[in-house]
Image (cartoon, rainbow, N blue to C red):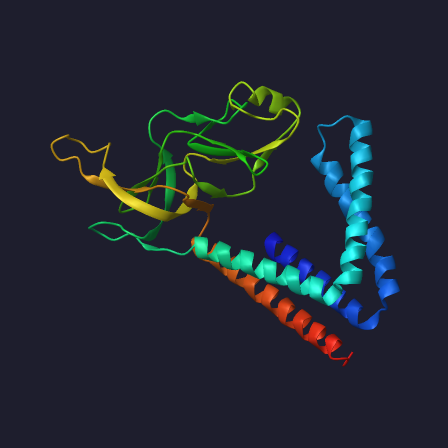
Amino acid sequence: MTSSLKRELAMTVLFAGALAADITLTLGVQCLLLLPAMMVVGFVRTWQRDECEPLDQRLGMAITFGFGWAMLAMLVLIVVGLAISVLVIALAAGIAAAIDRARLAGSALPTDGEALGRRTFAGTAHAVGAPEFLPTLDMPVIAWVARQGLRRRWSSGSRFELRDEHRRVLVEPTAAVIREAPLVFERGRVRDALRVLAGVNPARRFRVWSIHEGNTVFVVGETRLEADPSAPTLRDPGRVHVFVGAATVGFGPRRLEIAKASRRIVLAGALAISAGGIAIATALGWM
């Protein structure tokens, strides 16, 4: 059983338990169980997020957010109820999984002619020209993407290529989304990044995704045909497919990622149906 499957099953069991609690426990007991749990969750999440802050400020923020999460949970529980809350969360998770699956959809590149539409290609990754280096680290890669929060984003500038046994494509990393666990840089690394990443906030951690020479990856996105810069002669330059825009780059087989997204849709759908049924039955006085 993979770690992602274990995590998804654990979350499903947790929310199924919440639905069972909504049926069997009174509102007062639900509050007594939910409030300390949400207080701990809020404390831990804030404590991890503020690792660069001084200890007293970090502790104060964690305690404040812990109480805030608990009060918000109690308000939602009293006003909305567990079943409706689970229904909303399940619907949001199902929509997110459906969007993720749609990002992975694409047809194979045509053997010849214009490659209009959303396409997919899989192969080994290789540098085009000089290697790139991860920010603050003397580690050569062929492409990297860095993010700090939701708004700040940086990436390597050089295209890289993917090859299979028959053909090659080029990928623009400028707007690419890399589906992989990132490296998390904080404290001194964040301060070091000021020299190479314009606009970085030294008080916050940032994350870096990277692709190394020889990695087996797939790419999905819009393509266009361009003159092939590695063709042997200028007289007959040849043409190559270039993935541009918000291309999605993932590691391993694409079919497995599609299967994971489909599984999340099924689990979220089952939770949404159960929560909706309980909410309707409660509203009609059947429970």
Residue drawn at x 17%, y 35% as measured from the top left: 237
Observer-nearest residue: 2 or 114? 114
x, y percentage for residue 97?
54, 57
x, y percentage for residue 238?
18, 38
Observer-nearest residue: 53 or 242? 53
- In screen coordinates, is 223 left or right of 186? left
User: Quadrant of the rendered structure where residue 216 is?
Assistant: top left
Residue drawn at x 43%, y 33% as measured from the top left: 143
| Residue furthest top in the image | 195
Residue drawn at x 26%, y 50% as measured from the top left: 115
- In screen coordinates, is 10 left or right of 160? right
Vertical position of residue 86 compared to residue 100: above or below: below
| Residue furthest left in the image | 235
| Residue furthest front in the image | 79
x, y percentage for residue 108?
31, 55
Vertical position of residue 181 compared to residue 111: above or below: above
User: Quadrant of the rendered structure where residue 59 is?
Assistant: top right
Q: Quadrant of the image for the N terminus? A: bottom right
Q: Quadrant of the image for the C terminus? A: bottom right
Vertical position of residue 195 compared to residue 118: above or below: above
Q: How many marks?
A: 0
x, y percentage for residue 10?
69, 59
| Residue furthest bottom in the image | 286
Observer-nearest residue: 208 or 154? 154
